[in-house]
């Protein structure tokens, strides 16, 4: 379960990262089996970000896409 304040913080954090980059980060860890530390170094992002993206993917399916759509909606409205 994601609490509303955590979701807001996550959305704010994700604004700087493209959907493509978020998907590559998740794929590198879950599919290519790189460690969190290796993914973090490879993409120059924090280990915390990698953890959060992977957690979202596992709990919400394609979290990167869901979050991207959510952010797009907020920009329009």
Image (cartoon, rainbow, N blue to C red):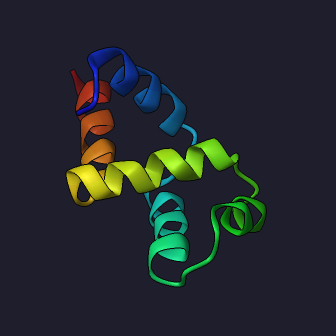
Q: In the displayed image of the protein, which residue is found farthest to the top?
A: 5
Name the residue rendered at 58%, 45% in the picture.
Answer: 49
Residue 50 appears left or right of 57: right
The residue closer to the viewer here, 15 or 23, is 23
The residue closer to the viewer here, 41 or 1, is 1
Is residue 66 visible from the viewing direction of this image?
Answer: yes
- How far from the left and from the top, in percent, is residue 64? 36, 53
Is residue 65 visible from the viewing direction of this image?
Answer: no
The residue closer to the viewer here, 71 or 64, is 64
The residue closer to the viewer here, 77 or 70, is 70
Residue 77 appears left or right of 75: left
Name the residue rendered at 33%, 57% in the picture.
Answer: 57
Quarter location, residue 77:
top left
Name the residue rendered at 43%, 56% in the picture.
Answer: 54
Q: In the displayed image of the protein, which residue is found farthest to the bottom?
A: 32
- How far from the left and from the top, in percent, is residue 16? 57, 39
Above-or-below relation of 36 to 16: below
Above-or-below relation of 72 to 64: above
Name the residue rendered at 39%, 23% in the picture.
Answer: 6
- How far from the left and from the top, in percent, is residue 45? 70, 50
- How far from the left and from the top, in percent, is residue 46? 70, 46
Above-or-below relation of 16 to 61: above
Above-or-below relation of 77 to 1: above
């Amino acid at each position: 379960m994601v609490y509303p304040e955590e979701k807001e913080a996550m959305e704010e954090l994700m604004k700087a990262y493209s959907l493509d980059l978020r998907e590559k980060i998740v794929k590198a860890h879950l599919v290519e089996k790189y460690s969190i530390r290796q993914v973090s170094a490879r993409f120059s992002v924090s280990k915390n970000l990698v953890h959060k993206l992977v957690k979202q993917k596992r709990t919400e399916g394609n979290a990167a896409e869901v979050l991207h759509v959510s952010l797009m909606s907020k920009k329009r409205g």
